[in-house]
Amino acid sequence: MRESFDQVTASDLGKHLIGYERLLALFKDIQKQTPKGVGLKREVKASGTYILLQFKLGDKRTAKACNCDFTEIGIVKALEKANKVSDALAKFTSETEFLAWYDEQILEKNQVKNDLISFCEAIKLVQDNYWNSYTKKRQQRDKNNPSHQSCWYQVYYCFYKLLPTENSVNLIDIMVVINSKKRGTKSYKLCICAMKKLCEVIGNNKLRDELSKIDVTQTKFREDLQSISLDDYLRFRESVLDIPVKDKRYNPESRNRWLFVFSMQVIYGLRVNEVFAVQNIDKPFKTKDGVTIPALNTPSNRDMVAVVGNETNLGTTTKTGYRLTVPLIPPTYPDLIERLDIKSGKLPNINPESGNPETIAKKHAKEAHTRLVQWAKQIGFTQTHALRHLANLNGMMAGIPLEKRAMSLGHSPTMNDTVYKKRQTTKTTLDLLTQSTNQAIPLQSAVAIAHKLRCTDEKSIKLLAAIYNVSKDETTNIMLVGL
């Protein structure tokens, strides 16, 4: 199946399709791939949504059922059947012969199903289906992509390998694997989803329906989610850089590079592997529609928009693909980009030590975690994702609307407004409350905006001094610090 999905454009930032919307998007793309003369059409009934094949039979164009549900598997199968119908229409001269063929090959009316398929054979069918399917970003899966290989293992095979492969597919063996996972956990839910997929692929609706009766609601969550305040992060950064001069036991270059990675998370809210996918760290990036995004290290770059690509420097896929992201700067630290040396940053040199897809896919996260364990364990901070959550809270303090923060972080507003607030520290909560009650934005933030607009003349200084009820000299000093 051809690779047909284009890169997400800048206007599509944050629009990540889920559930039924994603199926509709996939269906529309598959419709473009049908052979000439044969099309696909949705049919909505009280019992569910199905797919029809449209083609000309004799003098009339007809729409016939093709035994395909409106699911990802059903859509892919419908395309295969559309190609078969196209070949058959060219082959048969008699409508009667064609309809008889259609009943047997497309509707599978006279075929006796073999219910004694083994788990080994079923797993092979699921695997084939996986590699012929699309990702959530509507991209064709690639067997050479370590992220896609890792996904196959984590979502499906880690559960399938527990099945007795020589046995015929049966509910008892499936339930043994499911019950080996703790009910209410994410692993329990994923295991059931994987087993339902297996039943769906082999067409065993009876088994799938039995599994559908199980409550997969997740009730147990991680209780060790870490959080960190911006002040704590700045102290952590200083402590990492506070090393003896010319002491060969330390590698200041490596430390600076890894601190750049963590600081990029603080500024932009990136996932750790996404830092290694930023396209404009030291060179401009030209978008598909011809817009040039300046390099982050350009001295005159004030907007500091970062371009996250589809892939990292190791060839692994980023979770939400291409997007543009902007700095999330809290009003308490308007000079945060300068404090964290973002403009002069460089990425660490990372090389995969093996060809194992699972190892490559987790390489960035593992290396980052190793550094945090070495440097930050004493302050209880070893999770890189805490920095991503900190960026979100910084954006809240800056008054950046929920939708824009979600776009920049690369997830849904719902995720941003629920899950991410769980890591809100007491210090950040106090900052949010106090910063939002005294004034619209602090004087430092107003000065930063004035610099950005190049309004640093005497009239602007007098205006800010009057608005914030401070002396002209104090405003001038703050202006000079910001230069």
Image (tube, rainbow, N blue to C red):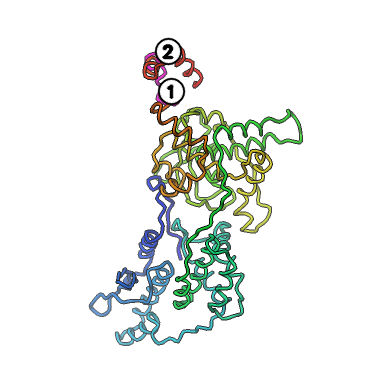
What's the distance in space between the residues labelled 2 and 1, CA to CA?
12 Å
Magenta span contains residue 449: yes
Name the spot of residue 178 as percent of width and height, x first: 56, 69
- Report the amino acid beneath label 2: Lys
Tell whether 279 sits left or right of 72: right
Secondary-structure class at tag 2: helix
- Residue appearing at x 62%, y 58% in the figure: 358
Name the spot of residue 153 as percent of width and height, x first: 58, 63
Name the spot of residue 171 as percent of width and height, x first: 53, 77
According to the image, label 1 marks what residue?
443
Instruction: Judge whether 273 appears above or below 210 on screen.
Output: above
Which mark sits nearer the N-terminus, 2 or 1?
1
Main secondary structure of the magenta stretch: helix
Q: Quadrant of residue 239?
A: top right
- Report the amino acid beneath label 1: Leu
Secondary-structure class at tag 1: helix
Which segment did they paint magenta? 443-461
Tell whether 96 sits left or right of 427: left
Q: List the single residue furthest toward the left.
A: 59
- Residue appearing at x 40%, y 87% in the figure: 110
Q: Which mark is residue 472?
A: 2
Is disc 1 surrounded by few (<14), some (14 to 19) or many (20+) residues within 10 Å? many
- Residue appearing at x 54%, y 38% in the figure: 264
- Residue appearing at x 38%, y 17% in the figure: 460
Q: Quadrant of residue 472?
A: top left
Instruction: Judge whether 266 appears above or below 140 on screen.
Output: above
Question: Is 443 or 65 nearer to us in this picture?
Answer: 443
Is disc 2 surrounded by few (<14), some (14 to 19) or many (20+) residues within 10 Å? some
Q: Which mark is residue 292?
A: none
Q: List the single residue furthest toward the right.
A: 248
Magenta span contains residue 185: no
